[in-house]
Amino acid sequence: MHWQSSPYTTPLFIGTLISLMSVVYIWRYRRTEVSTIFSLLMISVAIWSAGYALQVAGADIQTKLFWRNIKNIGVVPVPTLWLVTVFYYTGYRRRLTKRNLVWLALEPTISLLMAWTNPLHGLFDANITLVQSGSILILDGDYGPWFWVNMAYSYLLFLIAAVFLVYTFLRARHFYREQMKILLAIALTPWLGNIVYLTKLLFHWGNGPIVDITPFFFIVAGAVIAFDVSRHQLLAIIPVSRDVILHNMGSAVIVFDTNLSVIDLNPMAEILLHCSDETAIGQPITTTLAGANSAELAAIPLDEAAAQGETRISGSDETHYFEWTLSPLIEGSSLRGKILTLRDITDRKLVENELHNANQRLKQEIIQREQLIDDLDAFAHTVAHDLQNPLSVVVGYSDVMLHELTQKDDKELIDYVSKLRESSLRMGHIINELLTLASVRRQDVQPTTVEMAGVLANVEARLAMMIHNYQATIIKPDVWPLTLGHAPWLEEVWENLISNAIKYGGEPPVVELGVDTQADGILHFWVHDNGKGIAPKKQADLLSPLVPHKHGQRHKHGFGLSIAGRIIKKLGGTITVQSKNLPGKGSTFGFTLPLASAVRQAGNTTLPADRHQAA
């Protein structure tokens, strides 16, 4: 190879260096798909510039022809790579299918083969000679038909890319417009240089050598790229087109015009409706929706301005649920069509259905349990009433027998009959507690003002025989404050607490009744005995519902305390127990209720809200 000195070589190598520096920077800091394509473009420009520099520097025809063919390796792909870059940048990548890419690469491939095999056919150029132009030798000759085919193809691709850039520029936001101005400048600068070269080549205007000035314009474009990649985030942030958004949505989207003809749909819609954009676009939307074989989907009111709802689409193996939304498509002030969006909510619907079914099963179980409880209540009530009559007979005959036996002074028989009578009375008491429990559970009462003195008088009358038998002493205040409650239920509470105090008090039992007024206007009624007391560990278990208890060696059935606790809770109060667990110090059982006067002063005739709810 022979070389010559040329003033064009240094600027061309500078352009090569700038292009390669841009590639290095983009590849290092801007790793996106569009950056990769753009890097390939700049590598082609670098090969173009370097190859042309060496072509100009060659001093014989063989050297120049070799480096011209090397230059063409960079020249031929530039228009195609630029178009692909623009398509990626503007968001129209979907148009770059494998088939389209093959078609785009076909002409550049043929052109490159034509350039390298030109000596065999002369279709790319002919009559190549060396001519003196100033101080250097340059190639001269005639361009063949395929050269102009390649030029026409290249300009067509540049034109298409410019159209897409301008279209996207007009629709983009301000930030993206700044980027697209830069890209348009990068594209137009070498293009204009090439136009100048071609027109000079065709019409031979001006003086001086006919040198291809296109690579020199790439020096300017490369400088702009190097600056804007670092300063304006060129290619780092690209505009996202409607196509990208539409075709990457997880929901199915169908766009149709005012004539109900499909004008666009995304891949999710194609899958759902068993169609493709080629077959669906232009068809009535009703025809497209029919592809899903869903009567509910076909029933969507497409004539409404906007609507939403849910639909089902049944496949061969399962059913999918969708939430659909119908929205107007407005451009300016004109209605251009509508958008139908179908979002898959199958997972959510399955969970909702399962929760609904579980709720229905729970409701059914509750109904069955309530029915069972009602049946048991009715049965217990019937049994209790049925037992009361024979027990009354047993007690009555026991009284008669005791009277007769007392006359005969048969102590052993008197003892037997007395125990029979006592057991019968105890059974009667348990039956009454069962009836009270059923009444408390099933009834809702409105608390009223209760005079506790009258309630206690009734209780003492009911316990008169027990008080007599145990020789018990009852100590109580003469005056009681008015409280809110339900007198029949409170009689059961007092009877239970006083009878337990008598049974488990001292010998003889001394039972003291009292009431304390707390700071919050709540009354604390209490019953204190003089028995052995209760161990701390057993105090917490005493009030457990319907659980038998033991106190020392003497049994407590616990049923009465459980009923008393339920009554007081329903009246808005609480049961209390205190014991020092010392002989003679006994235990204190009590319960709380609201003071009637305090409630009236507050302007309320019912229980305080928080306590009533607690019941």
Image (spheres, rainbow, N blue to C red):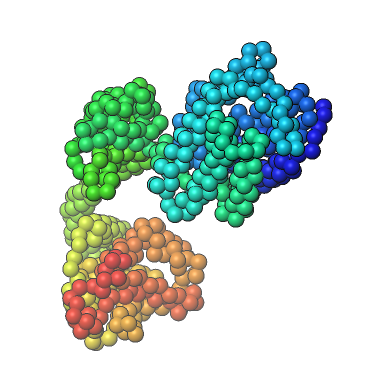
- Depth check, front residue: 400 or 164: 164
- The reply to whether residue 289 is in sight is no
Residue 508 lies, with reference to residue 6, above or below; the image says: below
Q: Position of residue 581 (x, y in %)?
A: 49, 74
- Residue at 43%, 38% (x, y): give it: 163
- Depth check, front residue: 558 or 292: 292
- Residue closest to the far top: 120
Q: Position of residue 172 (x, y in %)?
A: 42, 48
- Residue at 69%, 25% (x, y): give it: 69
Q: Position of residue 343 (x, y in %)?
A: 35, 39
Residue 436 lies, with reference to residue 594, above or below; the image says: above
- Residue at 30%, 80% (x, y): give it: 523
Residue 415 lies, with reference to residue 354, above or below; the image says: below
Q: Is residue 492 left or right of residue 559?
A: left
Q: Position of residue 252 (x, y in %)?
A: 36, 35
Q: In this view, does 48 lie to the left or right of 507?
A: right
- The reply to whether residue 162 is in sight is yes
- Residue closest to the far front: 207
- Depth check, front residue: 82 or 496: 82
- Residue closest to the far right: 2
Question: Residue 573: which quarter of the image?
Answer: bottom left
Q: In this view, does 68 lie to the left or right of 320?
A: right
Q: In which quarter of the image is the C terminus?
A: bottom left
